[in-house]
Image (spheres, rainbow, N blue to C red):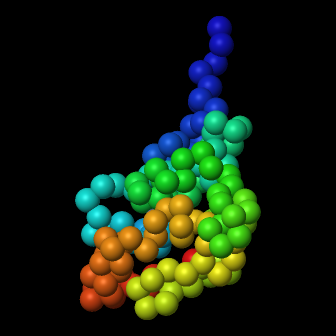
């Protein structure tokens, strides 16, 4: 007779991981830094290093992501830097500091590095709608977001 063992993924459970990752991110998308608070669609757990490439589901490989960023990121681990055309490493919220790669210029997001420029471009982080969201967030004290 075998003993019941928790599934490999259970400690912490998927629900607990979701809470841990959301709390660690302070409720902000770890890529575009938009707050989940006023968004209709719930945010997602993003596997920073994609599962399709062997990425683990431990919290060190998970990021809190809005649906738009999650969809844009997909399983990319590199993106084209629009300035040089060279491939740049995908932003990694656990091993890279957001502020090293991105900075605000009023309501526009500027990539400071090849990684930052590539993410801003590929994720369309300065679309009219995203700029508008930041302007609305500013009225509510949600923008600029806290340092990550
Ligand atoms: Zn986002």
Residue furthest to the top in view is 1
Q: Residue at x 43, y 68 (%)?
A: 27
Q: Quadrant of the N terminus?
A: top right
The structure residue drawn at horizontal position 63% and vertical position 39%, both measured from the top left corner, is: 51
Q: Tell me if I can see residue 60 in this picture.
A: no
Q: Residue furthest bottom?
A: 106
- The mark total stands at 0
Q: Is residue 32 visible?
A: yes
Q: Quadrant of the C terminus?
A: bottom right
Where is residue 74 shown, x and y percent of the image?
Answer: 54, 47
- Residue at x-position 56% and y-position 58%: 63
Q: Name the residue: 53% across, 67% down.
A: 121
Which residue occupies the foreground of this view, 56 or 33? Answer: 33
Residue 45 versus residue 26 in the image, above or below:
above
The spot of residue 62 in percent (x, y) is 59, 53
The percent position of residue 126, horizontal first and vertical second, equals 43, 74
Look at the picture and state if 144 lies above or below 40: below
- The image shows residue 120 at horizontal and vertical percentages of 54, 70
Looking at the image, is 117 positioned above or below residue 41? below
């Amino acid at each position: 007779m075998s003993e019941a063992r928790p599934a490999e993924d259970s400690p912490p459970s998927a629900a607990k991981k979701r809470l841990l990752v959301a709390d660690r991110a302070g409720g902000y998308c770890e890529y575009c830094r938009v707050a989940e608070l006023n968004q209709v669609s719930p945010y997602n757990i993003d596997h920073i290093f994609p599962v399709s490439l062997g990425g683990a589901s431990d919290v060190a490989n998970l990021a809190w992501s809005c649906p738009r960023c999650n969809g844009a990121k997909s399983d990319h681990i590199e993106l084209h830097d629009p300035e040089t055309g060279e491939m740049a490493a995908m932003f990694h919220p656990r091993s890279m500091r957001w502020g090293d790669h991105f900075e605000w210029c009023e309501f526009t997001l500027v990539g400071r590095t090849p990684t930052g420029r590539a993410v801003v471009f590929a994720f369309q982080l300065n679309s009219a709608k995203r700029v508008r969201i930041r302007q609305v967030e500013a009225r509510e004290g949600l923008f600029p977001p806290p340092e990550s």
